[in-house]
Image (cartoon, rainbow, N blue to C red):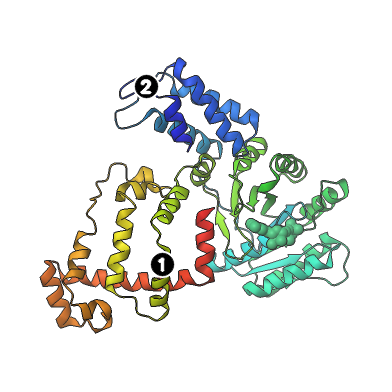
Amino acid sequence: SLQDKLDKALHNISGRGKISEINVAETVKEIRRALVDADVNYKIAKDLTKRVQDKALGQNVLTSLTPGQLMTKIVHDELVELMGGTSEGINLSGKPSIILIAGLQGSGKTTFSGKLANFLKQKKNKKPLLVACDVYRPAAIQQLKILGEQVGIPVYTEEGALNPSSIAENAVKFAKENGNDVVIVDTAGRLAIDEQMMNEIKSVHYFIKPNETLFVVDSMTGQDAVNTAKAFNEALNFDGVVLTKLDGDTRGGAALTIRSVVEKPIKFISTGEKMEALDIFYPERMADRILGMGDVVSLVERAQEQFDEEEAKKLHKKIAKNEFGFDDFLKQINQLKKMGNMKDLMGMIPGVGKAIKDVDIQDDAFKHIEAMIHSMTPEERRRPSIINTQRKNRIARGAGRKIEDLNALMKQFDQMGKMMKMMQGPQGKQMMEMMSK
Ligand code: GDP
């Protein structure tokens, strides 16, 4: 990870030393390389590292930190600030609120329109209306109709109409008459910027006066994404950016570059083709991603090292036959313990590392759980369903725990069983794939 590299480059400062000009030069190069690797524009990376260097110089390296950690923290904070610090919502104050979706063809506009409608319906209790304004590609209208059906949201279309502005205006009227409080207007895109397209979207923008104009851009297009963002911003002065296809290998540096160039907040990120794959943009998380911090990958790798294929097959069979019992639960715990120190493991989960820095986590967190399981009879471990109140009292007493502790364990066990069932289905596969990215 970047942090390790910085630690290596800064190896000559230990403990209470100060970061000095001599040992910072190499680390600055490492940081710049990491940022450029993550798709951050070179000039922005250069400016940023200069500021980081100034901030780091002369800072005391505390005994609790390594110089690499300290530098990473400074870079991280700088990234967060560059991306706006906090996440920004969208303007839903209109009656109805009109949201215009703009971007190049293939950027993910239509998919995002469906996701946003779904999000507003599920999370904000809204009654959205989707509007298909692509008069050139009947397939695009069809696609929006299918998405609308999938998420249970009406789609306004005008068969054979040729003027996107009038379709959009009619749609707003329709929304007012039908009690839709949000109108999401999906527009036509081209493969590249061209004047006709810009004029058309400017005209739609002028006629419907959206409360919120969102520019959708494919994060995999790297530097081109920035130029497109500039052109759309000049034409529409949009309110926010939606970064799509962040489920791929891209580290998300484009987010930083776009933000710096157009000075507009990124509001959503899209991470897949499914309607649920939409997230609010958090600068903090994106900074982690850009720096490759919160090392989930190595967590997964460690888990894989401990993974015993034969055992796993047996376990799968047991779960399928509903025979997963407390003995298997114990085995799982032991495997988890073999993966290493609990605090180290948790520290690898993004966002957790910093939070638990000062928390004392006992490595024997599982001691009580094991005691309770050992206090059960073999039959009880095999068939937990037979554990009634009388048995519970005996088990808890035997382990020197309270009945509440045992209840909590039983609940955990239940949930684990459910989760394991799920992990075996298609959803689980998807989750594992996501985690290994
Ligand atoms: P539009 O032309 O801008 O409306 O783009 P579409 O919404 O039709 O998306 C173009 C393609 O990208 C489609 O195949 C989508 O399924 C796919 N797509 C959209 N968003 C994402 C995303 O976040 N992740 C991935 N992997 N694919 C996406």
Q: Which three-letter amino acid code belongs to the residue tagged 1?
A: Glu
Residue 249 on image: x %, y % = 60, 49
Q: Secondary structure at mark 2?
A: loop
Ligand 1: quadrant of the figure: bottom right
Above or below 50: residue 261: below
Horizontal and vertical percent for residue 176?
69, 69
Q: Is residue 142 above or below residue 165?
A: below
The front one of 367 and 44 is 367
Is 110 or 390 nearer to us in this picture?
390
Picture disc at residue 310: 1
Asked which quadrant contains residue 355, the reply is top left
Q: State whether residue 186 appears in this view.
A: no
Q: Residue at x 83, y 68 (%)?
A: 138
Can residue 323 be seen from the camera position used here? yes
Disc 2 marks a residue whose amino acid type is: Ile
Q: Estimate the x, y position of residue 282 in percent, counting from the top left.
A: 51, 48
From the viewer's perspective, tell me whether residue 187 is left or right of residue 94: right
Residue at image mark 2: 13
Is 332 rendered above or below residue 270? below
Taking depth in this image into account, of 195 and 415 the one nearest to the observer is 415
Determine which quarter of the picture holds residue 157: bottom right
Q: CA distance from mark 2 to mark 1?
A: 47 Å
Foreground: disc 2 or disc 1: 1
Q: Residues within 10 Å of mark 2 (few under 14, many from 20)?
A: some
Q: Residue at x 59, y 26 (%)?
A: 47
Q: Residues within 10 Å of mark 1 (few under 14, many from 20)?
A: few
What residue is shown at x 30% (from left), y 51% (from top)? 342
Q: Residue at x 41, y 54 (%)?
A: 305
User: Would residue 197 appear left or right of 232 to someone viewing this image?
Assistant: right
